[in-house]
Image (cartoon, rainbow, N blue to C red):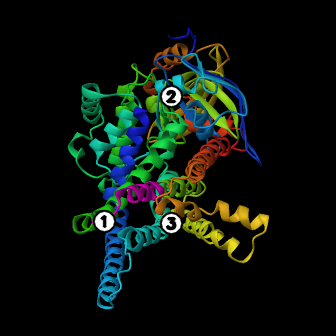
Amino acid sequence: MAVPYIHMIQVEGLTKRYARHIAVDNISFSVDKGEIVGFLGPNGAGKTTTMRVLTCFMPPSDGTATVAGYDVFKKPMEVKKRIGYLPEAPPVYPEMSVGAYLAFVGRLKGMTGPDLKRRVDEVSERCAVADVRNRLISKLSKGYRQRVGLAQAIIHNPEVLILDEPTSGLDPKQINETRELIKNLAGEHTIILSTHILPEVEAICQKIVIINKGHIVATDSVENLTHRMRGSDAISLELETDGIAGQSDVQQRLESLSGVSKVLFKHATDHKLTFEVESLPGHSARADVARSVVNAGWNLFEMKSLSYSLEEVFLQLTGGMPDGGQQ
Amino acid sequence: MRNVWTICRRELYSYFVSPIAWVLLTVFAFLGGYFTYAASAFFVKDSLQSQMMGQSMPMNLNDRIIVPVLSNVAVIALFLLPLLAMRLFAEEKRQGTIELLVTSPVHDLEIILGKWLSAVLMYGALLLLILADFSFLFVYGNPDWKPVALGFVGLFLQGASILALCTFISTLTKNQIVAAAIGFALALILFVLSWATAFDSSGVAQVLSYISIVSHFDSFSRGVLDSKDFIFYLSMIFFGLFLTARSLESMRWRA
């Protein structure tokens, strides 16, 4: 039955037009099996629209999207069978109990009998809602509701999970729990999650797609993206001199090293001096710097790699930072 | 078909955990009981009177009790049914659960049929209350059962077609009250259209009168099975559900 496919999710030239504006404009990306991809962008960037197209909630205006080789427009039933979806607001019926609700969703997804019962038990255990199975959903806290929403999404053990802002509106403890849960789901499922919370992507995802105003502005792994933004290797250096050499001496010595392009004095606390050392493109001067400091008889306290935080990358790419960062 | 039943079952569950089912059951039990009681009381009074006057007028349970009660119930049902159908889609849209339904591997038609069927079954339960009232007539008298059965078939079909139209109305809004109000207005229009021929017998009036949902019920309540009326109700149901399907589809394109 299964059709051959290369990527679990393949989006090509996807466009979604509304009467007055274009929500998503000609975007393309792909997600491999087992990956967790973060869909990142400010509010209104087109994240939810893209997800709704992938879940066959709405058809695309242009372009194609395939899930496990099936086109969302031509073979929606096949796609729907393979997708678990958690919309931004968990789609729960407040008047139902958790157990009855999960059983209902299971039946909707085509499960029956003992299989259904077993899966309801499993997912309520997994999403930590087993203790509230007989409670009405209307009586549950937001965190529990969100977990019921997640349980609902994975009940038929779908190949692909699509989670729209799975941690929005939760308190920090619940956010952590939800993230752990999502990380645990990785591997068995291919996951796309959207968020505008940056640490979340850093914490969970292997790959990010940054989307802004309907366009994809970057697609890469978290490390590559932050690295790429910086361009060359930069380190922050904290050291203590012997008391004789001053700040300018240190600076001169470091600048004389080959492979170092720039040395910036940052600040001094007590006897410790902090510098920012940038290597020439394509070089890494870290080893030379360390050796040079130690050879001069100074104490090296700290040396750490400087990279843009994802936050800076994000703001730069989505135009939130007018001067384009430090580059 | 299994999906239709899954969705229908959940709807029935929601009816019975919300006050709506109980309120309607109470209203129907009360009104149906009162109509039957009042009609029976008149019947008894009239038969006593005709006895005392020494005339033996032919008096018939079917004509004097069952037909008027069924006609009254038909009108009441017309106005209470929007309450049954108002939440079907409006509530799903408000809660966002519509996203769950349309992203699940079920066809739109299965969703629509499941929801409509649940409302129709609820309505069937309401009609059972009326049937319970009539059971006394069968215990103490011997009315002809065939027109009664046909009357219920007519009531059922009339309700099912109103519910189909109201299901469609429910897809148009997120607000149950709005859905109920529009449904109520529609029911009222369909009701008063039957008056059109009273003062005008032009072709237009004839057509309007034909569209009126209640005018087709009369023949049923008198125990006449006219295929024309039968087909009218079936096409009304089809029309309502067809509009619902189109509306659901357009909602996705616009969403």
User: Circle 3 is placed at which residue position?
Assistant: B78
Q: How far apart are the alpha carbons under marks 3 and 2?
A: 38 Å
The residue under label 2 is: A80
Q: Are marks 3 and 2 on the same chain?
A: no
**In front: B208, or A71?**
B208
On the picture, is B241 further left or further right than A182? right
Of tags 3 and 2, which is closer to the observer?
A: 3
Q: Identify which residue, B36 or A7, lies in the foreground.
A: B36
Q: Chain of mark 3?
A: B
Say which quadrant the C terminus of chain B sits in: top right
Q: Residue furthest top?
A: A4
How many badges with numbers are in the image? 3
Point out the stretch of residues depicted in magenta: B142-156
Query: What is the x, y in percent for residue A75?
Result: 59, 23
Query: Which of the chains bears the disc numbered 2?
Result: A
Q: Residues within 10 Å of mark 2 (few under 14, many from 20)?
A: many
> Could you tell me which residue is drawn at 42 percent across and 35 percent down?
B3
Q: Which residue is mark 1?
A: B134
The chain that hosts pointer 1 is: B
